Image (cartoon, helix red, strand yellow):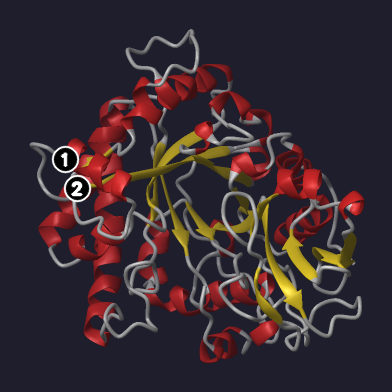
Amino acid sequence: MKIHKAILAFALTSSSFVSASMQENHANEVPHGKVVAAYFADWQYFHPDKPYNVKNIPAESLTHIIYAFLSMCGPHEYASKETQGLVKQQCKGKKPFTAIVVDKKSALTHDFGPVEADVNYKGHFAQLAQLKLEHPEVKILPSFGGWTMSEPFHEMAKDPNAIKHFAYSAAELIERYSFFDGIDINWEYPGGGGLTTQPWNPATKLLADEMELEKTAYTALVQHLRDALDELGAKHNRYYTLTTAGGVADKAPQIDWPAVAPNLDHIFAMTFDYLGGWAIFTGHSANLHATERSVWGMGTDVFIQQLLDLDVPPEKIVMGTTQYGRGWEGTKNYHGEPPSETLMSARGAQFGTGENGYFQYWDIIENYGEKQGFQSHFDKESQAAYLWHPKDKIFISYENEQALRAKVKWAKANGLGGVFSWELSGDPSGKLMRALYDEMHSAASLPE
């Protein structure tokens, strides 16, 4: 995530955290009216070390499960060759921009075991149907897009008819699977800044008129989705939820929030990945509070305030949390104090959990502890956890139960709609989700 100082300056202009006026929220009630959601990654079932499937989901600690990811027929040139092949296969005979289940093996045919649910398919979808039988109060939504499959959104945005077609085809898709309770949109990002529209690359950077077109297109997309879901709801006498994942910093102003917020039940603010191995800056990747030490003044509180300043109702904002960490090696001039904007590393860590510099929570707990020479620290001012290896000069920023509980307390105290986590396979034990859920339903106040 590339952050521009001008955007951060804009986000920091308000001197206090103020609540916007309450607006209509169509969502069905959840315990205490608060959301505790998490994304489920459909590809993690074949992880070589910690395979994760629907049976591992701690449903008792969740109000919403977001299935990642579905897509639509359209260009996927930046996706893997495997994904491109699957899209081509699923789109035979379909109109461009038709909603699709990309990985049908994962979703519909892989045998994860018998279910009592009366369905004629297998895969994760059968297991989700079973979960819905056992936990009818949990909302289950498919998410369309994601980092590697958002490319077709940019093409869709150029044609109003394509936008409407996708919206209604997405509603038709979820109608085939009755355990789905709505739709989540994970377009990364309207107005650019994602994998295929990198603003620092002249070949992919969107021009000003293209950015404005996508802002208008996103508003139309949300309206068409809401209309399609309402028509589906009238047909089946039920309410269908509509949510979106929303970028922060320079991504947030690229959406017309006053226009779209009334049609959205929840907005999953992606308040994480502030720093990572893609840059030499070393520091917290998802700290709650920005401090004078924070790189470019980044912090979750800053970005939530930015959304409020853009007229996003606080009760619809669902704060993002993580089940992973980001790490660097060759860290310079570190003396055991919390990180500052002057802390640099030679590079991102050249090791991790399947991806260099990326560490799932279970991996941190099992392989990056005191036994391996790591020191555990907690930055009280930033409310963020981190690890330090003094001999090897390795710095890892991550979120533990203490950091997550602090975020929930802050979200509650400031009237936010809840919290969500990316993503469930990071902690197969379910301890992190339990911490989020328990804190959300406790009477705890703000952290110190």
Residue 386 sits in quarter: bottom right
Residue at numbered disc 2: 73
The disc labelled 2 sits on which kind of residue? Cys
Q: Say few, some or many: other residues with alpha carbon within 10 Å of mark 2 (under 14 / 14 to 19 / 20 or more).
A: many
Left or right of residue 14: residue 293: right
Left or right of residue 146: residue 55: right
Q: Quadrant of the C terminus?
A: bottom right
Residue drawn 72% across the image and 83% down it: 344
* Image x and y of residue 77, in percent: 25, 59
Residue at numbered disc 1: 91
- Considering only order in the chain, which callout, 1 or 2, is on the residue closer to the N terminus? 2
Left or right of residue 367: residue 322: left
Q: Determine whether the residue tagged by mark 2 lies in a helix, strand or loop.
A: loop
Q: Determine whether the residue tagged by mark 1 lies in a helix, strand or loop.
A: loop
Query: 176 above or below 77?
Result: above
Residue drawn 91% across the image and 53% down it: 370
- Alpha carbon separation for disc pair 2 and 1: 6 Å
Front residue of this view, candidates 405 and 282 = 282
